[in-house]
Image (cartoon, rainbow, N blue to C red):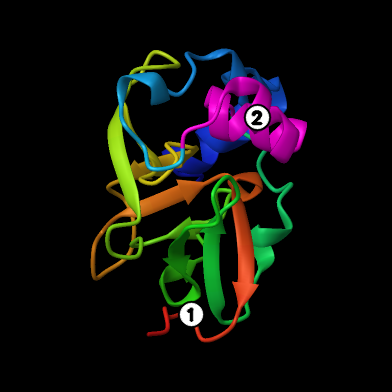
Amino acid sequence: MTNRRHFITRMLGLLGLAGLAGKASPVEAAAENFEVAKSEAEWKKILTPAQFNVLRKEGTERPYTSPLNDEKRSGLFHCAGCDLPIYSSKTKYESGTGWPSFWAPLDNAVGTKIDRGFLMTRTEVHCRRCGGHLGHVFDDGPKPTGKRHCLNGVALKFEPGTGELSG
């Protein structure tokens, strides 16, 4: 039997609604003071259109489209907007949702806020340094946290290595 998460993921993909998420309200970066702050024009110069849609407009990439979903090497996943290391490969796991998933971020790497889009309440996760939208956090992940940080691969850059910060 298909569980609720898989059903919703499949329906979003089939209906094309995942791509419509970019029509949601933009990241409220102006309301918060982030270390990295740029104008919309500056973000558009350094990000691809897909990255801009997700990171700055809270869009969602289609499931199963990111090569990072299948990334198995040790290393760190960085914010594609400001290059802050935010997740270790040591906390990545296969959630079956079609998006890269992690059970915990690195310390002091992300922030959260309530997202009431798509007629539901979720917890949005964003880069704590630039405010870029990364994805959402759910309470159906594995031990030890029970959390599933379900992220847009286009919002991330992967740096192979040990999966831990040096220094």
Q: Is 36 included in the stretch rendered in magenta?
A: no
**77 vs 66, nearest the viewer:** 77
Quarter of the rendering containing residue 59 = top right
Q: Is residue 151 above or below residue 160?
A: above
Quarter of the rendering containing residue 125 = top left
- Residue flagged by tag 2: what amino acid is it? Glu
- Residue flagged by tag 1: what amino acid is it? Gly
Q: Are marks 2 and 1 in contact (CB under 8 Å)?
A: no
Residue at 56% over, 36% down: 9
Q: Which residue is mark 1?
A: 163
Residue at 24% over, 70% down: 144
Q: Which residue is mark 2?
A: 42
Q: Name the quarter where the C terminus is drawn.
A: bottom left
Q: Secondary structure at mark 1?
A: loop
Residue at 32% over, 20% down: 31
Most common SS among magenta residues:
helix
Q: Secondary structure at mark 2?
A: helix
Using the numbered discs, state the Cα–Cα distance from disc 2 to disc 1 in whole angstroms.
30 Å
Q: Going by the image, does 130 lie left or right of 51?
A: left
Q: Earlier in the sequence, mark 2 or mark 1?
A: 2
Q: Going by the image, does 120 lie left or right of 18?
A: left
Q: Can see residue 47?
A: no
How far from the left and from the top, in percent, is residue 72?
Answer: 62, 76
How far from the left and from the top, in percent, is residue 53?
Answer: 64, 27
Residue range in magenta is 37-59
**61 vs 128, nearest the viewer:** 128
How far from the left and from the top, in percent, is residue 26?
Answer: 49, 18
Q: Is residue 103 above or below residue 48?
A: below
